[in-house]
Image (cartoon, rainbow, N blue to C red):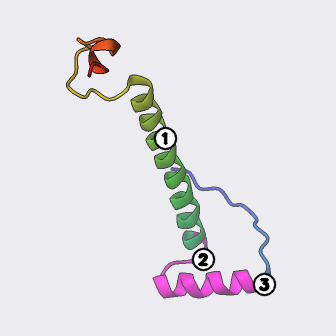
């Protein structure tokens, strides 16, 4: 994996908190920010995959143990 330098501008209070959090985790500020970006990207990828699975399930429908076509008619269901 190759690494690249990027300049990021943050408000002073946000930068201060990020530095504190990085120190608390025992990592550099750069590694802390990289891990946050990576976490966000992975989360987005997992959401997209879950969404695609859900859409496929809706397209395919659920198999409920019934035949493809009902073996009864509407009239038979509504007989009294």
Q: Is residue 39 above or below residue 67?
A: below
User: What's the residue at 23%, 11% (across, down)?
Assistant: 71
Task: Tell which residue pokes out farthest to the left in this image.
Answer: 65
Of callouts 3 and 1, the N-terminal one: 3
Which label belongs to residue 66? none
Which residue range is magenta in the image? 13-30
Closer to the eye: label 1 or 2:
1
User: What's the residue at 47%, 82% (across, down)?
Assistant: 25
Say which residue label 2 marks: 29
Measured as percent of width and height from the top left, residue 35 is found at 52, 65
User: What's the residue at 59%, 61% (across, down)?
Assistant: 37
Helix, strand or loop at mark 2 = helix
Say which residue label 3 marks: 12
Q: Is residue 46 above or below residue 23?
A: above
Report how far apart the C-alphas of labels 1 and 2 lie in the structure.
Answer: 33 Å
Crowdedness near tag 1: few (<14), some (14–19) or many (≥20) residues, C-alpha within 10 Å: few
Which label belongs to residue 51? 1
Image label count:
3
Measured as percent of width and height from the top left, residue 39 is found at 51, 60
Of callouts 1 and 2, the N-terminal one: 2
Crowdedness near tag 2: few (<14), some (14–19) or many (≥20) residues, C-alpha within 10 Å: some
Report how far apart the C-alphas of labels 3 and 1 lie in the structure.
Answer: 37 Å
Closer to the eye: label 2 or 3:
3
Q: Is residue 31 left or right of residue 8?
A: left
Instruction: Name the chief secondary structure element in magenta.
Output: helix
Report how far apart the C-alphas of labels 2 and 3 lie in the structure.
Answer: 14 Å
Helix, strand or loop at mark 3 = helix
Measured as percent of width and height from the top left, residue 5 is found at 68, 60
> Picture quarter containing residue 53?
top left
Residue 66: in magenta span: no
Q: Is residue 49 above or below residue 9?
A: above
């Amino acid at each position: 994996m190759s690494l690249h330098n990027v300049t990021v501008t943050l408000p002073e209070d946000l930068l201060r908190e990020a530095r504190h959090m990085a120190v608390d985790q025992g990592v550099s500020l750069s590694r802390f920010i990289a891990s946050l970006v990576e976490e966000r990207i992975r989360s987005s990828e997992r959401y997209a995959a879950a969404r695609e699975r859900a859409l496929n399930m809706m397209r395919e429908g659920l198999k409920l143990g019934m035949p493809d076509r009902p073996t009864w008619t509407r009239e038979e269901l509504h007989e009294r």
